[in-house]
Image: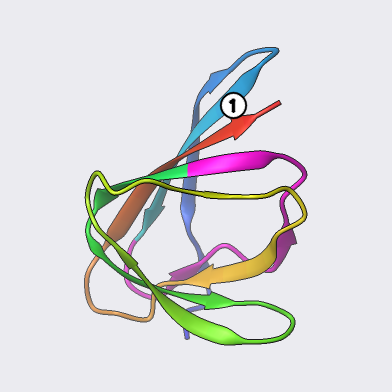
Amino acid sequence: MGETTAIATVQIDTEVMRVTEWRFPPGTRTGMHTHELDYVVVPTVAGTLRVVTPDEEFDNELVVGASYTRPRGSTHDIVNDSDAECAFVEVEVK
């Protein structure tokens, strides 16, 4: 697994939402974290990211335009251990 941090670019940050682009070059990860807000993920570059939670590990396939949501309190590390870059836009609801 990679040791480099994924690239996060905050695009919008208002009183009601925060929009962040996440880019995962090969070998990058977010680091273990807990989401404080409900959020939507909008994949922009297809690929497979490894999700590591305190209880399990599994692959999450990103399909461009196939959005999904997760609740606040989600705890995980997101890892790109593939040979291709993956990316998504995360929209957090404040």
Q: Measured along the vertical axis of the image, is residue 9 above or below residue 48?
A: above
Residue drawn 64% across the image and 29% down it: 93
Q: Which residue lies furthest to the top in this view?
A: 15
Answer left or right for 19 relative to 48: right
> Which residue was labeled with disc 1?
18
How crowded is the residue under tag 1: few (<14 C-alpha within 10 Å), some, or many (20+)? some
The residue nearer to you, when weighing 41 against 68, is 68
Q: Measured along the vertical axis of the image, is residue 61 above or below residue 83?
A: above
Indicate the position of residue 24 as horizontal and vertical percent values.
38, 60
Identify the magenta region: 25-40
Displayed quadrant of residue 74: bottom right
Residue drawn 59% across the image and 26% down it: 18
Indicate the position of residue 62 as horizontal and vertical percent values.
30, 61
The residue nearer to you, when weighing 6 against 14, is 14
Indicate the position of residue 65 as horizontal and vertical percent values.
24, 44
The residue nearer to you, when weighing 10 against 41, is 41
Q: Does the magenta stretch include residue 34?
A: yes
Answer left or right for 64 relative to 56: left
Residue drawn 65% across the image and 68% down it: 76
Count of number-bearing discs:
1
**Rendered-image quadrant of the C terminus:** top right
Answer left or right for 44 relative to 34: left
Residue drawn 67% across the image and 49% down it: 71
Residue type at tag 1: Arg
Indicate the position of residue 21 as horizontal and vertical percent values.
42, 39
Identify the coloring: rainbow
Q: What element carries label 1?
A: strand
Q: Is residue 83 magenta?
A: no
Q: Measured along the vertical axis of the image, is residue 62 above or below residue 80?
A: above
